[in-house]
Amino acid sequence: MMMTRYRKNYPNLSVITRVYPSCSDSDGPAVRQVWRTDGNLKEHYGRNDNQQFFNRGGYRSFRNHSHWRAKPPRQLGPCGRFPGGSVDGSNWRGDGQTERGRGGNKFKNFGRGGAWRGRQKGGRGGPIFRITIPRAKKYRQHWLISSLQTHSPIPFKPLHYCTSGQSVHFYVEDEAAASALRRLSRKITDSEGYKVVVFANPCSSFPVQQTSLKPEDLKHLKKCMSKRFDVSQKCLDLSSIHTDPTLVSQKIQVTLNKNNCVKAVLAIIEENIPALSSLNLSNNMLFHLNALADLVQKTPNLKSLNLSCNELRSEEELNNLKGLGLVELWLDRNPLCDCFDDQTSYIRALRERFPRLCKLDGHALPPPISFGIETNTVLPPCKSSYVVSDEIMSVIQRFLQQYYSLYDSGNRQQLMNAYHDGACFSISLPPLTNPTRCMLGEYHDDNRNLKQITDSSTRIRNLKRSRLNVVAFLNELPKTQHDMSSFTVDVNTYTNTLLAFTVSGLFKDGEARVIGGSKQSVRGFSRAFITVPAPNSGLCIVNDELYVRTASSVEMQQAFKAPPAPTPSSSHPASTLSASQQEMLSAFSRCSQMNLEWSQKCLQDNAWDYHRAAQIFTDLKEQGKIPEAAFIK
């Protein structure tokens, strides 16, 4: 009846008999009949889901599928970076193959990192696998491992055999071996007739405990490293050190992703191989390089480093090795290689950390772009101010003296003649986290920093227009005192009808504010003036932009320190200088680079006429008539 009904709905229905091998040799073969159609490879219930999760009644059955099922190793071929070449036994993939849903390779010449690829024989770069056998603590380790190795079609090497409760755990580094071990579940029978259950799960690292190595362990480690050291090449090969037979036979766990093991290895290198030039750390499951930061001090001559086939996921890890003068570096088959879009960005990121790098992943790099300047070249000293000529500097100096003498006088209404009828003025402040507690709180309401003020009405309100509004607003600002000796001037634009310059320096409020128990009144400023010629051979301000900031601790210490009194010469007896003369003397000394004694002499000889003294100084300097002693400070 059932067959007749099914044949009416599915005319191509047929019965297939499948023979399944039994789990033990004593049981007979299992025979199961499966209904299917000959037309489509589709379940007879019309479902498109994965048929292994459906029982014969059409309901989901997760029996025998509740544990992780290892996939068979993909036939990917050699995994590498370079087309047509072979570096460390690796080649590139052919066209048309995709990885993780992505088509083709990211890099034409450098390939992908490949940390997710399956661990085939001789290959690295994928996750390790934890093998768990429940209720296996009662078994002898030799019997259990030998039974698994006998029945497994793929050879494997168990790593870090341990027990947890009644279960046994060990690790393998081969995906194919892990899949084969999982398929051995319930196929091995112990002496009591119980089936041995095997689970396999991927994991990221070995859970090695941070136990210090014993003195006898260090002796074996030192002996192992001596066998791996090439004296002629000064090369130390520590690749896959955790699987070294010498250490495994002594049950010594040396895993270089643990700090205690790294410190022990670096101590041996520092004591016995200080001139090490090449180090191979491939295939060591390195996730971080923090513990290897001491390589910079302990191996100053290291030129070649191999970090391939590890688990480094971020390029920032390489900052721990930034001080090494590496010439050769291997990083292929690390997850961090997948973080770069192309070969250029890959090379650039590494050369930022290792400028002398000439070889990457076994391939020569193009020569770095440099300016051709030797490292010992002495650069010219930085000038405090930049002016077009001494004539322009004298005009600006005269303008600043007049302007700030009125600005600091307390009555700023006298600045009315300094501004044009259509002049504009604005104040900008740096970003403030707490304006009410900040030293610049008095200026906060008038801040017009366009990066912070986005409201158009506030921008318009805080821009002061016309001469009357500008001077009225300046008169409302806090009283100030400027340190003329701290001024630096940079001329931006100079024509016959326009002069734009920026003056920077220090000032303090008339009333110091007390913050944290100390007076904090010194502030820095930068002021950009755009001026046009005035009828009285002066300057008229068209645009004025003031930027106010807090002063640094160094600036606070140096602010408002009067210059030392100049040593009087024989022809010019000492005289008491006024405040304006002190400021002129300081400015002239800074611009001429002469010391204060010779600067005072030049100004006094020219009746303290700054412009005339500057012109005479320029003429005498061009003629070479100023002695070298005038420039000794």
Image (tube, rainbow, N blue to C red):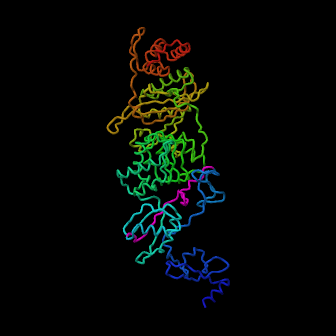
Relative depth, front residue between 566 and 100:
100
Question: Do we see residue 461 in this rendering?
Answer: no
Relative depth, front residue between 521 and 63:
63
Looking at the picture, does residue 391 appear above or below residue 510? above
Q: Is residue 285 magenta?
A: no
x, y percent for residue 215: 35, 50
- Farthest residue, direction left: 517
Question: Do we see residue 497 in this rendering?
Answer: yes
Left or right of 47 on screen, residue 583:
left
* Quarter of the image where the N terminus is located: bottom right
- Farthest residue, direction bottom: 1
x, y percent for residue 135: 39, 71
* Highlighted magenta segment, given as a residue range: 109-137
x, y percent for residue 9: 65, 85
Relative depth, front residue between 408 and 223:
223
Q: Is residue 130 magenta?
A: yes
x, y percent for residue 12: 67, 83
Looking at the picture, does residue 241 appear above or below residue 544? below
Residue at horizontal 34 percent and vertical 34 percent from the top: 519
- Farthest residue, direction top: 571
Looking at the picture, does residue 329 appear above or below residue 604? below
Looking at the picture, does residue 162 appear above or below residue 410? below
Magenta span main SS: loop
Relative depth, front residue between 310 and 509:
310
State how many labels appear. 0
